[in-house]
Image: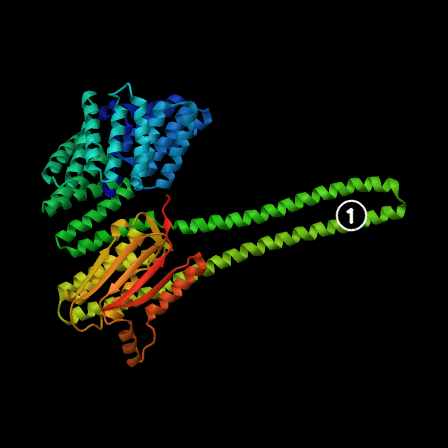
Amino acid sequence: MKIILTIVFLLFFVQQGYTQEKELDSIKNLVKRYSKRDSVRVNLLNQLTKYYTLRDISRSEILIKEAIDISEELGFSEGLGNSYTSYSIFYTQTGNYDKGLEYALKAKKIQDTIKDKEGLLLTNNCIARIYIDLEKPEEAIKIQLENLKFFKKDSLHPQKAGIHFYLANAYNGIDNLKEAELHYKKAKYIAEQTNFKTGIHIANSSLGILANRKGDFKDAIKYLESTLKFYEANNQLANIAHSNLEIAKPYANLGYVNKAISFNNKAIKIYEEQKNLKSLQVAYLNQSNYYKKDSDYYKVNEFLEKYYKIKDSIFSSEKQVVIEDMQEKYETDKIKKDKELAEQKNIVITAQKKQNKQYFIMAITSLGFLFLILLFYFQRIKIKRKAEFLELELQETKKRMVLEKQYKNSELKSLKAQMNPHFMFNAMNSIQSLVLKGNKDEAYNYLTKFSSLIRENLNMSEKSFVYFDEELSLLKKYLELEKLRFRKNFEYSLIGVETIKDIKIPSMIIQPFVENAIKHGLLHKTSGLKNVTIEFFQEDVFKCIITDNGIGIIAAKALNKIKGKQDSFSTKAIQDRLSLLKEYYKLDIGFEYENVNEGTRIILKIPYQIDEE
């Protein structure tokens, strides 16, 4: 679903008259001939930017910067607001949502001030699109329902079609396909009544995407191929790429993998030329999946490598680090402010003493005068020493905070790094076993899944907290590998996944407990089906219950004693990590083991964070 919403069309940002190639040539010539830096040129630049949004987004930025510069020189508020909106569209379409939202909010502030209704509608569309891409469709729905109030009397305005279009995308985001289809059809109706041909094809394309989601693959192809011809005739590169990307999906679902690869490859070529990283990331991942259907594992890995390379470039930093830096800056600024207040207070005291000195001179003898001078002198020394003390304290506090943060982060990352080799050693033993038995196909399949797991494992090891869905994805990959290792003698169950909402938990916290259950409980079970059940509960704390039907705690300890083994490496690593998390994040994380009729139960309780983004 996120893929569909991320590569949403921007054509509804453009008025009806901007659809013909000859008009593009006309506006390009006007921009070239009209060089005067005034409001006319600003409007021309913003119009040309809208054309390039549909064709080649990479050519927009230089035009937007010039429009912003001229608007700021002239104090042209309307032009500046529109230019900021164009910048928001540019950043959003290239996957930089922070910048996209920043410029949309700048534009909205200006447009609210000058009561620019048309500008506000366009900016609200930008913000709604960002919320959709960030998987917050409810927020997008609120914005677009508010936008519809502008058109109570004008039922056939082209921009109203755009609002219905984005409402449909938002309803897609919450899997309300009935409402999504209704608003796509409303957008199409307005486009038909106003002879907005491009709008008609965008609505048809969206209905095609919706048909693919509903499993009506032939209808999806029919919708999408007709829109592709229109976009090709009008040289709308962005929409051509998107149509090729979407047509590939129903062909793949119908089993025409080669056709799917061909269409998707055309989309990749355009996205690479335009440097559209967000869309390119989706296209690479789709291509990897298509080649997987075709059993071309060399190509699978090639496009997975490209996918992860872009993903790493887009999501390279953790918000937790930003929060820590902000906290450090707050503490430093607080100490600095306290120092300044102390200095100001001492200045006031000094001034008062100076005034008292003047009265004192008139009332006392020369001896008293000398005494006052000495008192003032020592007071100045005291003030100076206090200021020096506060300065030293400030520097020491900053050093201490930096060292403490480095120590804690390095200690936590080191412990995480210890856990990864332990798991990799077990997995590589399984691969070796398959190779020695001559199961080359299974070994290759195991190795492919193992590389995907290691990639995700390493990515998560850099994060302190992750979404529950990310932790669940890692756990599923690990269990699938264990299932492949045990073959038909191992089953697992995940219960309560759908009850867990958008929360964050410490990364890689569940998998080590599951690994312990398999290694110490199930591995030594000599008969019957080996089974592990994992249940999730979101209450006052996040609770995870892991139950296996292995040999049980007592038998496992007895076996270790016979073999002369102490606690396993993973058990020690888990205990160390939980202690460190408790100390560093002030979280009271608890777990306990219980014997059950057959096997062992682990009850893990973890405080969680609610996602407020």
In the depicted structure, whether residue 154 falls above or below residue 546: above
- The quadrant where residue 524 appears: bottom left
User: Which residue sits furthest front?
Assistant: 597
Crowd rating for badge 1 (residues with CA inside 10 Å; few <14, some 14–19, many 20+):
some
Tell me the quarter of the image containing the C terminus: top left
Classify residue 104 by image quadrant: top left
Element assignment for label 1? helix
- Residue at left 32%, top 38%? 131
| Placement of the N terminus among the 4 image quadrants | top left
Q: Residue furthest right?
A: 365
Instruction: Name the residue beneath numbered marker 1.
Output: 376
Which quadrant of the figure has residue 389? bottom right
Q: Position of residue 498 (x, y in %)?
A: 25, 49
| x and y percentages locating residue 25 in the rendered image | 26, 25
Q: Amino acid at mark 1?
A: Phe
Image-based side of 4 in relation to 296, left or right: right
Left or right placement of residue 338 versus residue 50 in this view: right
Q: Is residue 588 above or below residue 15?
A: below
Q: Nearer the viewer, residue 187 or 428?
A: 187
Q: Residue at position x 36%, y 27% from top?
A: 120
Locate residue 102, reporting x and y percent: 40, 37
| Count of picture labels | 1
Lateral position of residue 498 relative to residue 389, left or right: left
Q: In the rendered view, would you say 547 is above or below 610?
A: below
Q: Is residue 59 visible?
A: no
